[in-house]
Image (spheres, rainbow, N blue to C red):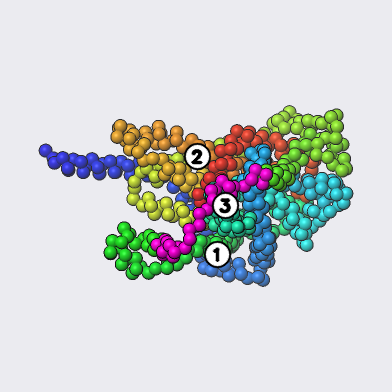
C-alpha cells in the first residue's frame, strides 16, 4: 500500500491541476478576445508602420523601414502638414479646455457637498448629459447656436451672431467657445460625481482643526482638501488630457456639413482617411505611423503629467544605520517606525518644560446654525443656477419637439409652444411606419439595442469569470498578467484604431460577406472589442478582493467545487458591481460614434446605429433639416437611456464616485 503522504501529495497535485485548468477556462474568454481585438491590432499596427501596406492588395505590401515616419515629419507633404496642423490646433485648445473642465466640476462638487435642499435632483440633472449621445449634443447645440435668426440664442439676443456659420474654423473663435460649452455640458457630470465622492471622504475633524488654528477657506482648501483629493485630481487630469487630445465628437457634430469638414483634431484626421476606402488604402502604413506617433505623444503627456502631480514624500531625517542600531538594541520592535517614535519623543521632551495648553471642547468651536444656514442658501442658489444650465438644452429639445411649424418660426423663440393649440405630435408621426413600410428610426434603435445588449452580456460574463480566476484561483503567471493589464491601461485606445480597421478591411476583402452575413460581420467587430475593457474587469476584481475568504473556505470545506462557489456564492454577491458595469457598458456602446462610423461608412442606411444615424442625418450647421423632426427624433432615441437612468441613477452615480476615489 502507498504511504498516506504520497496519496495526499498526489491528491494535492491533482487538485492544483484541476484548479489551474478551471482558472484557464474561466479567464480564457476574456484573454482571447483581449488578445485578438486589442493586443494584436496594436502589435500589427507597429509592424504596418514599417511597411507599405494595402489591406486590399496584399501583393503590394513590402517593408520600407522608417520611411512612413520620415514622411510623417516631411512638411512638404500636404497630408503631413494636415496631421500636425490638426494636432497643434487641438493641443492649443486643450491648454485652455483641460483646466476649465477640471475647475468647473470641482466648483460644483464643492457646493453640492453642502447638501442644499433638493441636492439629489440637482445631482441627477447634472449627471444626465454624461450618458447622452454626441449626436443629440450636435442637434441641440447646433439649433440653439445657429448663426442666422433661426437660432434660439440669436433670437433672444436679437442679433445674428455667427456662432456656427460661415466657413468652419478659419478665424472662427466662437465655434470653439460653443465646443467648450458642449464639452462642459456633456463631460462635466462624470467628473463632478468623482470630485463629489472625493470631497465627501475628507475627514471633517481636519477642517475643525484648521479653523481652530485660524485658517480661512483658502487655507482649508490648500492644507486639508487638496492633499486628500490629490489622487482624484491626478486621475481626472490624466483622463481629461488624453480624452481631449483625441477629441472627435464635438468638433464633428458642430461642424458645418454644407462645407468641407476641416480636420481640427488628430482623430478627425485619422477617421477621415481610414474611411476613405480604396482611395487611401495604399497609405494604411502611413496612417498607422500617424496613429502610433499620436498615441506616443498622448502617453508622453500622461507621463509628464503624472511626474509633476506625483506625491513628493519628504526624505527621512534619520539614516538606515541609526534604524539598525535601535532595532539591534531592541529599543524598537522594528526600525521601520523609528522616524515617528524619535520625532514624538523629541517633541515630548521639548514640550516637557512648557506650560500645557488645554483646548476647549470641540462643541464650542463648531459652526453656528446661522453660518450653516447661510452656506446652504448660497450653495442652493449656486447649484440651482448650475442645474438650470444643464437642464436648459434638454428642456429646449423636449419643448421644441412638441411645437408646431408656426411656433418654431416664432421670434423670439420660446422654450415651449406659445399656446395650447400649438402643441402637436406631428413631428413624432411616422416613426414606426412611414408610407406603408417600416421607418428607419426603429431599425436604427433595434441595431443599437441588440448590439448593446449582447455587448453588455458578454462584458459581464467575461469580467465575472476573469476576475474570479484572478482572485480565487491559482495558476502560474497570474501576478505578471495582472501587472501587465494594469500597465496596459496607460496605452491609449487610439493605438489600435488604424490596424484594427486595416484587419477588418482585409478580412472583409477576403471573405466578401454580403447581405445579412455582411451585417453580422460588421457588428461582430463592433461588439467584441468593447467587451474587454480593463477598467470594468479590475473593478470586478476589486470587489472580489473585498469578499471575506472565510466564506469561500467554508463552502469548500462543505464539499462545494470552485465552480459551485462561483455560481452560488460569488455571483449573487456581485450583483451591485455587475449592475454598475451593465450601466456603464450599455451607455458607452449606445453612444459610441468613431468606431461605428468607421465600420458602417458606405454601408446601407438601415445598418447604422442610432448615434451614428442621428449624427449623419440631422447634424450639419444651419441646413440641418426640419428642427421639429430632429428634436422629436432625439427625444425618441433617448427613451431607452432615460428608462435605465431613472431606475438606476443612484447606483450609477454612487458607483462612479466610489470607483473614482479608489483609483
Return the x and y of residue 498 as percentages of the image width and height. 57, 56
Give neighbour class at mark 3: few <14, some 14-19, many 20+ (Cα, 10 Å). Answer: many
Return the x and y of residue 10 as percentages of the image width and height. 21, 42
C-alpha distance separating marks 1 and 2 = 33 Å
Give the left or right position of residue 480, taking residue 228 as reference: left
Residue at the (33%, 35%) spot, across then down: 554
C-alpha distance separating marks 3 and 2 = 33 Å
Q: Which mark is residue 207?
A: 3
So how many labels did they put on this image? Answer: 3
Q: Which mark is residue 577?
A: 2
Q: Mark yes or no: residue 166 visible.
A: yes
- Find residue 333 and report its image quarter: bottom left
Find numbered disc 2 in the image and state the secondary structure of the residue it sits on.
helix
Give the left or right position of residue 284, taking residue 145 as reference: left
Return the x and y of residue 628 as percentages of the image width and height. 79, 38
Of badges 1 and 2, the one in the foreground is 1
Q: Along the line of sight, which residue is nearer the eye, 19 or 273?
A: 19
- Find residue 352 and report its image quarter: bottom left
C-alpha distance separating marks 3 and 1 = 27 Å
Residue at the (69%, 48%) spot, across then down: 185
Instruction: Looking at the image, tell me whether mark 3 or mark 1 is earlier in sequence order.
Output: 3
What range is drawn magenta here? Answer: 344-371
Q: Which mark is residue 308?
A: 1
Find numbered disc 1 in the image and state the secondary structure of the residue it sits on.
helix
Give neighbour class at mark 2: few <14, some 14-19, many 20+ (Cα, 10 Å). Answer: many
Residue 165 shown in magenta: no
Residue 349 shown in magenta: yes
In the figure, 324 relative to 601: above or below? Answer: below
Of badges 3 and 1, the one in the foreground is 3
Instruction: Looking at the image, tell me whether mark 3 or mark 2 is earlier in sequence order.
Output: 3
In the rendered image, which quarter contains the N terminus? top left
Residue at the (34%, 46%) spot, across then down: 474
Amino acid at each position: 500500500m502507498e504511504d498516506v503522504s504520497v496519496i495526499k501529495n498526489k491528491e494535492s497535485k491533482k487538485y492544483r491541476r484541476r484548479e489551474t485548468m478551471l482558472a484557464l477556462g474561466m479567464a480564457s474568454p476574456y484573454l482571447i478576445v483581449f488578445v485578438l481585438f486589442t493586443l494584436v491590432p496594436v502589435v500589427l499596427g507597429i509592424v504596418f508602420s514599417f511597411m507599405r501596406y494595402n489591406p486590399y492588395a496584399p501583393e503590394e505590401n513590402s517593408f520600407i523601414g522608417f520611411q512612413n515616419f520620415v514622411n510623417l515629419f516631411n512638411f512638404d507633404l500636404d497630408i503631413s502638414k494636415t496631421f500636425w496642423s490638426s494636432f497643434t490646433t487641438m493641443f492649443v485648445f486643450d491648454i485652455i479646455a483641460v483646466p476649465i473642465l477640471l475647475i468647473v466640476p470641482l466648483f460644483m462638487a464643492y457646493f453640492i457637498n453642502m447638501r442644499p435642499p433638493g441636492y439629489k435632483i440637482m445631482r441627477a440633472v447634472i449627471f444626465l448629459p454624461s450618458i447622452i449621445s454626441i449626436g443629440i449634443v450636435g442637434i441641440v447645440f447646433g439649433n440653439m447656436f445657429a448663426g442666422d435668426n433661426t437660432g434660439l440664442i440669436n433670437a433672444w439676443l436679437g442679433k445674428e451672431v455667427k456662432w456656427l456659420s460661415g466657413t468652419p474654423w478659419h478665424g472662427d473663435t466662437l465655434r470653439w467657445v460653443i465646443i467648450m460649452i458642449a464639452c462642459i455640458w456633456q463631460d462635466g457630470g462624470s467628473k463632478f460625481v468623482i470630485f463629489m465622492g472625493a470631497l465627501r471622504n475628507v475627514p471633517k475633524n481636519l477642517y475643525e482643526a484648521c479653523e481652530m488654528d485660524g485658517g480661512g477657506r483658502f487655507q482649508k482648501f490648500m492644507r486639508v482638501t487638496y492633499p486628500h483629493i490629490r489622487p482624484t485630481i491626478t486621475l481626472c487630469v490624466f483622463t481629461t488630457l488624453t480624452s481631449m487630445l483625441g477629441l472627435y465628437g464635438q468638433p464633428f457634430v458642430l461642424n458645418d456639413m454644407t462645407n468641407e469638414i476641416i480636420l481640427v483634431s488628430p482623430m478627425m484626421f485619422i477617421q477621415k482617411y481610414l474611411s476613405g476606402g480604396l482611395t487611401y488604402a495604399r497609405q494604411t502604413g502611413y496612417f498607422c505611423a500617424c496613429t502610433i506617433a499620436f498615441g506616443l505623444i498622448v502617453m508622453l503627456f500622461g507621463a509628464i503629467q503624472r511626474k509633476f502631480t506625483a506625491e513628493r514624500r519628504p526624505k527621512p531625517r534619520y539614516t538606515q544605520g541609526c534604524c539598525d542600531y535601535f532595532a539591534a538594541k531592541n529599543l524598537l520592535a522594528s526600525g521601520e517606525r523609528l522616524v515617528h517614535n524619535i520625532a514624538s519623543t523629541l517633541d515630548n521632551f521639548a514640550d516637557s518644560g512648557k506650560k500645557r495648553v488645554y483646548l476647549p471642547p470641540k462643541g464650542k468651536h463648531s459652526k453656528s446654525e446661522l453660518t450653516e444656514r447661510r452656506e446652504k442658501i448660497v450653495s442652493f442658489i449656486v447649484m440651482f443656477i448650475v442645474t438650470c444650465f444643464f437642464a436648459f438644452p434638454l428642456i429646449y429639445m423636449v419643448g421644441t419637439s412638441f411645437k408646431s411649424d408656426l411656433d418654431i418660426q416664432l421670434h423670439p423663440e420660446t422654450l415651449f409652444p406659445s399656446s395650447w393649440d400649438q402643441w402637436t405630435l406631428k413631428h413624432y408621426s411616422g416613426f414606426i411606419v412611414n408610407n406603408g413600410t417600416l421607418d428607419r428610426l426603429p431599425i436604427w434603435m433595434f441595431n443599437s439595442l441588440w448590439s448593446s445588449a449582447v455587448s453588455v452580456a458578454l462584458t459581464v460574463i467575461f469580467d465575472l469569470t476573469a476576475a474570479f480566476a484572478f482572485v480565487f484561483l491559482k495558476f502560474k503567471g497570474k501576478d505578471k498578467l495582472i501587472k501587465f493589464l494594469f500597465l496596459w491601461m496607460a496605452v491609449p485606445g487610439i493605438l489600435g484604431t488604424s490596424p484594427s480597421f486595416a484587419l477588418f478591411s482585409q478580412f472583409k476583402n477576403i471573405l466578401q460577406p454580403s447581405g445579412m452575413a455582411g451585417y453580422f460581420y460588421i457588428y461582430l467587430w463592433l461588439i467584441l472589442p468593447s467587451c474587454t475593457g480593463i477598467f470594468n474587469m479590475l473593478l470586478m476584481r476589486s470587489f472580489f478582493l473585498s469578499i471575506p475568504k472565510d466564506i469561500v473556505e467554508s463552502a469548500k470545506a462543505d464539499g462545494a467545487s470552485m465552480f459551485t462557489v462561483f455560481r452560488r456564492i460569488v455571483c449573487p454577491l456581485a450583483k451591485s458591481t455587475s449592475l454598475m458595469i451593465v450601466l456603464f457598458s450599455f451607455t458607452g456602446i449606445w453612444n459610441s460614434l468613431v468606431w461605428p462610423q468607421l465600420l458602417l461608412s458606405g454601408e446601407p442606411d438601415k445598418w447604422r446605429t442610432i448615434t451614428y444615424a442621428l449624427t449623419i442625418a440631422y447634424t450639419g450647421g444651419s441646413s440641418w433639416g426640419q428642427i421639429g423632426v430632429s428634436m422629436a427624433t432625439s427625444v425618441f432615441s433617448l427613451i431607452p437611456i432615460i428608462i435605465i437612468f431613472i431606475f438606476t441613477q443612484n447606483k450609477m452615480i454612487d458607483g462612479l464616485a466610489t470607483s473614482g476615489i479608489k483609483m
